[in-house]
Image (cartoon, helix red, strand yellow):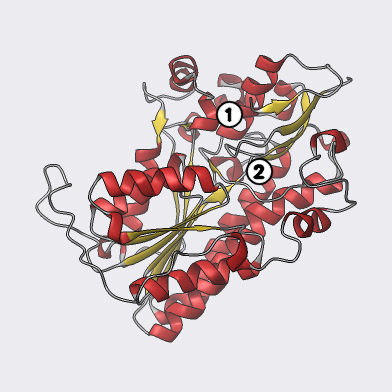
Amino acid sequence: MLARIVDGAVDPTQVERRAGLLAAVSGLRFWHRAGPSGLLPAARADVGALPTIQAGRRSAREGGTARDVGTCPWRARQRPRTSGRSILQGRNTVRLEGKTAVITGGASGMGRATVLRFLDEGANVVIADFNAATGQETVDLAAARGHGERARFVKTDVAREADIEAMMQCALDHFGQLDIVFNNAGVGGAIGPLTETTVEAWDYTFDVLGKGVFLGMKHAARIMIRQGTGGSIINTASIAGLSGDAGPMIYSAAKAAVISLSKSGAIELAPHYIRVNAILPGFISTPLAHGGRADKIEPMFAKAQPWPEAGQGEHIAGAAMFLATDDARFVTGESIVVDGGLTAAGPELSRRFPQISARGAGVVGVTKGSTGEAAEVRKLGG
């Protein structure tokens, strides 16, 4: 179950639905790292009662290194075959053949859809995610499609610089180069009104959504500049970053930061032929969003937007595919909205789906994504 109930104050199904809907506004692939230890200690027995987010992070990996917590399985460095033509349906070309991509948050939702799309298109892919179980599932799916030699999983905390360096090195060790980085990892993070939000919840949200993108851009750029062959950096932002009432407050602020960081990075890296763009998902049906009840949630998403069908991870994968290819070689510093016309509805957004705002949720705390760990959420006034 998504949320752990605090003092029996919240109906389990209500918390699960509300947390999922709040987080789903971004269409996130919900990846997780060790979270804040100071919000609800009763829900933190797995990492211990420590006073800060940073302490909680150290506790989860005490005495370890990035390679202790999730390394790329070793094999001799070589360039594997990149034939995926038999997998593609109705295509005569493999548009990413010979390219190597790193995708964070690649073990479920939008990230997994992009991993499989890139593999089908001939790329080598490093799947970086905190959730080892879903990471292995994604590797197995890749193998079932005939791509086992071109997929590697690395357990990664995107808020730890050592982990980011390790996942990039995995790409170099196994595939010899780095061409595409998709900074897609995320969490729902802080939810609830401004007056009830803690500093720890703010820090947790920005550590993953802001720092994680910054570190991914930084280390991708270093390698791509050194290679001298250009590259594509893609960041997952959200339509929540475009206005003040399209998602939880702190989450929206973090996604606005990603949009701005993408523009600034595009300017700095353009002389090196490195493109930087952001994808802004709307309502995307991911495991976290529907909680195993896609038949109930997807009609709600469809009603909230002009397009009559809920967004799927494959829609985001298609946008990422465009930005990864030479078709987008003159596209940089852009924010690509993929939302079924949702933002075209303008001020109708919050009225179409009031649950996406803090005012419509009635809860406060932190959501942590489709990781198997409980959200730390309580009912307002409870």
Discs 2, 1 touching: Cβ within 8 Å: no
Q: Classify mark 2: residues with Cα within 10 Å, few (<14), some (14-19) or many (20+).
A: many
**Residue hosting label 1:** 347
Left or right side of 192 for 261? left
Q: Give how far across and how far down residue 348 sits, in percent.
A: 56, 24
Q: Residue 342, how many percent across, how many down?
A: 47, 31
* Residue 319 in view in this figure: no
Residue type at the position of mark 1: Pro
Would you identify the image quadrant in which residue 261 lies? Answer: bottom right
Depth order, front residue of 163/194: 163
Residue 94 falls in image quadrant: bottom left
Q: Residue at x 39, y 84 (%)?
A: 227
Q: Position of residue 293 (x, y in %)?
A: 49, 18
The residue that label 2 is drawn on is: 252
Mark 1 Cα shell of 10 Å, populated few (<14), some (14-19), many (≥20): few
Answer with the quarter of the image where residue 230 lies. Answer: bottom left
The three-letter amino acid code for the residue at tag 2 is Ser
Q: Is residue 245 visible?
A: yes
Give the residue displayed 70% in from the left and 56% down from the top. Answer: 207
**Disc 1 element:** loop
N-terminal-most mark, 2 or 1? 2
